[in-house]
Amino acid sequence: MRLGESAGKTDPGRVRRRNEDAFVVDPPLFAVADGMGGAQAGEVASRLAAAAFREFREADELGPEERVQAIIKEANRRIYERARTDSEVSGMGTTVTAALLTDGRVVIGHVGDSRAYRIRDGRLEQLTEDHSLVADLMRSGRLTPEEAEGHPQRSVITRALGTDPDVDVDTLVIEAQAGDLFLLCSDGLSTMVSDADVLRTVERADTLDAAARDLVRAANTGGGEDNVTVVLFRLETDEAVEETLVAPVPGAEATETEQESDLEDTLTGLPPVSAAAAATTTAEPAIVAEPTAAPEPLPEPAAEEPRRRRPPRWRKRILWAALGLGFVALILGAALYGLSRAYFVGADEDGRVTVYQGIPFDLSDGVGLYRERYVSRLQSSQLAAGERGGLFDHELLSYDQARARVATYEAEAVP
Ligand code: CA
């Protein structure tokens, strides 16, 4: 048995401007990290974790479980040390869920609420147990799964990298077989997409790259309230005739580059999308124009009238060009109109309820047509799922309407 396809993708989602997630596809190691902390701290934490996976070679000689433990503990030390000595990122932390493929086994190590799943024989099985408040409450029988889903504190994790000098790492050893597919993801996927839809999406895709892209898209369709990251890999038999090892996934190196570019966080100044970002993330085709508005091609001359002149080609081309330009102008006009007139409610990178001016669309990764106008002290996690659904419906409002809508919930939740 050996590694077959693998893939990784990350996307900021539809509500947050920053992407605080990071991932590693560096066979036989795979990982997802979901950072948290104000300003850029979450990004720093998750990238430090990802870097530890690529750099910490001292662990290479250890047994598989010890190796995973050692890398995650090293990541914890690096983040803790940085948070302790750099006031700009104090208090930062990150989850990590990692997988190491060894002889017939997959060793999973994790801290926090990023998850690992295995898909086998058409069934999706969650391998990790979240280190989160609601998971604790569920385990002790004080919350039902239904209650947990809408619980206001459902994003509160009980264990993270970077908050203490040492960290408890859960590891589990999974006996694997050919055909098994492993999925690592941040909670931006698991809270937005049901298990059944995750399974359906993966099984429908032709390749793992396509599956990763479709999962990100499903999370965005489901609300995209959080950064979403997925890593997938499949095991196959040694006898498979296709080419041996997986081609290195661009995401393995690209993650960092991409996130460097994300640090250029200029909302209105449309930051350049790096080639790496384009390669590893799925740009939601929010306003991508399909040329469906174009008319049918002009009729071809009938066979029995061979002498009739065809319309000159250039005329067709000009028609197409004009239609294309018109469409672009229309979209830009709508966008500018939206920017000047419209407001909507979302959450910023720290989860605070925020009134944005503009329209809730990202042209491509990280390029949003909106900017912050009011940031509430209200955390989106303080709202029940139903309330979030109502508040973050992305309806375009006037500024006063948007403020009034937020104020209703502020009055309830903020003392
Ligand atoms: Ca998250």
Image (cartoon, rainbow, N blue to C red):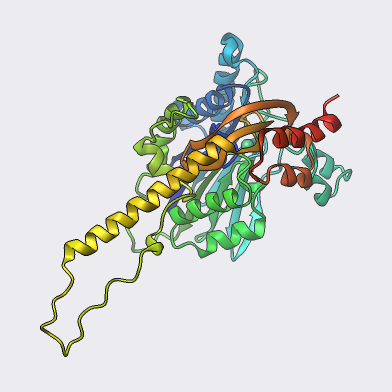
The residue most toward the right is 142
In which quadrant is the C terminus drawn?
A: top right
**x then y, percent, for residue 135:** 77, 41
| In front of the other: 281 or 412 | 412
| In front of the other: 415 or 373 | 373
The image quadrant that residue 188 belongs to is top right
| In front of the other: 119 or 8 | 8
**Left or right of 156 on screen, residue 192:** left
Q: Residue at x 66, y 26 (%)?
A: 374
Figure quarter occupied by ligand 1: top right
On screen, residue 356 above or below 323 = above
The residue most toward the bottom is 304
In which quadrant is the N terminus drawn?
A: bottom left
Number of numbered callouts drawn: 0
Is residue 226 in sight in this rendering? yes
**Left or right of 42 on screen, residue 413:** right
Q: Residue at x 72, y 37 (%)?
A: 401
**x then y, percent, for residue 100:** 52, 42
Q: Residue at x 13, y 76 (%)?
A: 309
Is residue 65 in sight in this rendering? no
**x then y, percent, for residue 304:** 16, 90
**Left or right of 343 on screen, residue 303:** left
The image quadrant that residue 319 belongs to is bottom left
**x then y, percent, for residue 14:** 57, 42
Q: Residue at x 58, y 16 (%)?
A: 89
